[in-house]
Image (cartoon, grey):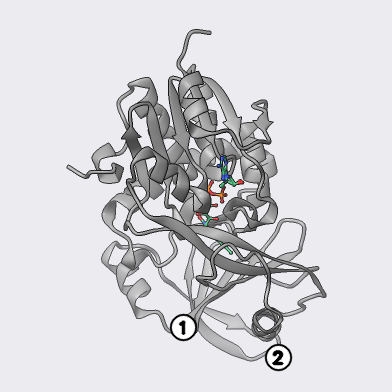
Amino acid sequence: MSGPRVAVLGAGAVGAACARALADGGARVRVIDPGAGRAAGSWAAAGILSPSHPESLPGPVHALAARSLELWEDIAREHPAVELRHTGLVLVGDDPGWLAWRAARGLADEAAAWTRADGSEVAAHRFPEVRVVRTPRVAPALLADLPVEAATVPLEQLRAESDVVVIAAGAWAGPLLDAAGGGATVGPRRGQMLLFEDGRIDTVLMEAGPGGVQLAVPRADGRVVVGTTLEDVGFDAGTVPADLDRLEAWARAWVPGLGAREAAWSGFRPWSDRPVPLIGHVGPGLVAAVGHFRNGILLAPATGELVADLVLGRAPRVTPEDFSARPA
Ligand SMILES: Cc1cc2nc3c(=O)[nH]c(=O)nc-3n(C[C@H](O)[C@H](O)[C@H](O)COP(=O)(O)OP(=O)(O)OC[C@H]3O[C@@H](n4cnc5c(N)ncnc54)[C@H](O)[C@@H]3O)c2cc1C
């Protein structure tokens, strides 16, 4: 093989998508990740392939999401284990900003009724195009035959050993970006999640209100994932009993037939001070793919494609300047 030697730092969904696209394009890829377990956003996430709070996101994020959704269909064909399913999403409660955003784009908003656990019916909106994936399976599927070196390797050593280093370390990318000279301020935003044994739900259910977003996501095996919180607590990957109880009470009211609580965890969304992810060169031989915040599962495939396009000198499918460290 004669492609460039590329080291990818981070084996979450974003790093895995970068590694996959680079390897498929002919690069000689190393993937390095000391391992964050369930605290990695890509393990913890709900797996909804639809932008969260779309009305607050700039156009380039939607362009990246649109390209990602095309790639997600290819990934699902090649890797059925990711369990991509067209579940749709039912929105209950009041979210005029989201509804107005959809109406302005001519996106379907079907009148629906949601039957709560006590049998009462509530008016709702159904967004039929929404898909979900089983998040912990995404990065392993994309990495496939690419091994992950479970280590922390100093950036300078990797730069000496590689033609390009890709920083895709999610919420942990701050020190790496600082060493590279900046580009964005990034940090963790915790989200707590619960898993229930079963429940009579075959669509994503979401209630957005002043207290945040509550959601329930059915898995193909019949289990139900429930969340979530949005907290600035540094790298504290614990869970808070009162928060879990509040989320469970919400789910017991809204999801008929909810089974026993099976597990709980929290993970870190990679927040950044930019309105769009940073995807591009941040120094000689250094490319960043960071700051995907609430939407990194959705955006991972097109992020990987853009990184590979930049590294391999191909024509990008999205406008790279929209994501670069210094927008044109
Ligand atoms: C509760 C919750 C719900 C979410 N729901 C959704 C959703 O429904 N849809 C959606 O699209 N997004 C969702 N997200 C957001 C999504 O999870 C993230 O945006 C996405 O996982 C970020 O992927 P990543 O690969 O950048 O980061 P991560 O998955 O966090 O991976 C970063 C990796 O970098 C590694 N690392 C750390 N330091 C180093 C180092 N020095 N060298 C090498 N590797 C390093 C870590 O060990 C980790 O494995 C959710 C997030 C949370 C927490």
The foreground one among 302 and 204 is 302
263 in relation to 175, above or below: below
Would residue 10 appear left or right of 108 to someone viewing this image?
right
Can see residue 297? no
Residue 176 in the image, given as x and y percentages of width and height: 46, 42
Can see residue 48? yes
Q: Which residue type does callout 2 highlight?
A: Asp
Q: Which residue type does callout 1 highlight?
A: Gly
Q: Which residue is mark 2?
A: 118
Q: What residue appears at the point 43 percent right and 47 percent down from the top-left corner?
A: 290
Q: What residue appears at the point 62 percent right and 39 percent down from the top-left corner?
A: 33
Residue 209 in the image, given as x and y percentages of width and height: 46, 83
Q: What residue appears at the point 46 percent right and 29 percent down from the top-left corner?
A: 165
- Tell me if mark 1 has few (under 14), some (14-19) or many (20+) residues whose alpha carbon lies within 10 angstroms of its own: few
Q: Residue furthest top?
A: 2
* Secondary structure found at label 2: loop
18 in relation to 46, above or below: above
**Comes first in the chain, label 1 or label 2:** 2
Would residue 65 appear left or right of 48 to someone viewing this image?
left
Cα separation, mark 1 vs mark 2, equals 21 Å
Assign the C terminus to one quadrant of the image: top left
Residue 242 in the image, given as x and y percentages of width and height: 68, 84
Q: Which residue is mark 1?
A: 209
Residue 84 in the image, given as x and y percentages of width and height: 61, 48
- Asked which quadrant contains residue 46, the reply is bottom right
Q: Residue 34 has which mark?
A: none
Disc 1 residue: CB within 8 Å of ligand 1: no
Q: What residue appears at the point 32 percent right and 58 percent down from the top-left corner?
A: 275
